[in-house]
Amino acid sequence: MSIFLTIINRKFKNIAGTRYERILKNYKEFFLTEEELSLPVIKSILMPVDRSTRNVPEEIYEVLSACEDAEVTVVYIMSEDACALIRQTLGEEASREFRQKEEEAGRELLERIARSLEDSGLKVRTRMFFGNKSEDVIRLSRERDLLVIPRLYGSEITKTRSISPVVMKIVHHVDIPVIVY
């Protein structure tokens, strides 16, 4: 920050008296540090999707294409709890049917997104498994440089929230940059 501070001081020297120094002192926590100004190197990207993911906007593919050497892992996590609940309430046959439809829908979505990412020039891996949508994304993100997640991931939005509670939990528990779309 010292470079920017000297530039700012030189630019505004003797302008408006001590007013600028007072503003600089009061708002110094809002100025970016040298570390914050440097762009992180992104080599691996995690992109969780689920049944609530309809379409990935073209802008996301454009942004991710800037990470030329990055590998994108698109993961479709099916809710283990939902499957267990269906098994307990409706029986084993309904659970098996739900699981089959969920896997089919997941495979189609993964193929469509992987194709679009490959068209953008990115390396893509896909995974599909049953698990806990929030805990597994938090765990998988520890090994990645960037998380790209739909705002509806894990549950539908409500009238009072434009981002699902699952996404809010994930964003609060990861230590990497996040793009919510």
Image (tube, grey):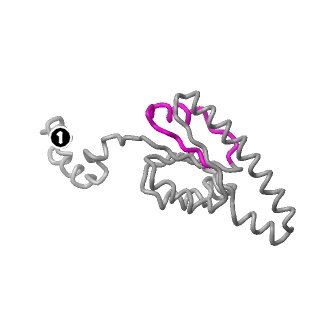
Whether residue 38 is in magenta: the answer is no
Q: Specify start and end residues of the magenta stretch as a single range.
A: 53-75
Magenta residue check for 66: yes
- Could you tell me residue 160's position as x and y percent? 65, 59
Q: How many residues crowd mark 1 within 10 Å: few (<14), some (14–19), many (20+)?
A: few
Q: Nearer the viewer, residue 124 or 58?
A: 124
Q: Residue at x 52, y 28 (%)?
A: 121
Q: Is residue 83 above or below residue 141?
A: below
**What element does badge 1 sit on?**
helix
Q: Residue furthest bottom?
A: 88
Residue 42, compared with residue 84, is above or below; it is above
Q: Quadrant of the N terminus?
A: top left
Q: Position of residue 174 (x, y in %)?
A: 46, 57
Number of dots carrying numbers: 1
Residue 65 vertical position relative to residue 38 in the rendered view, above or below: above
Q: Pick the residue in front: 167 or 75.
A: 75
Rendering quarter of residue 68? top left
Point 58% across, 60% down: residue: 134
List the residue tagged with mark 1: 3
Instruction: Name which residue lies at 21% across and 40% down.
Output: 4
Q: Position of residue 149 (x, y in %)?
A: 57, 48
Residue drawn at x 53%, y 31% is 62
Q: Quadrant of the C terminus?
A: top right
- Residue 5, image x and y in percent? 18, 43
Left-right relation of 74 to 81:
left
Residue type at numbered disc 1: Ile
Left or right: residue 82 versus residue 76 is right
Relative to 44, residue 165 above or below: below
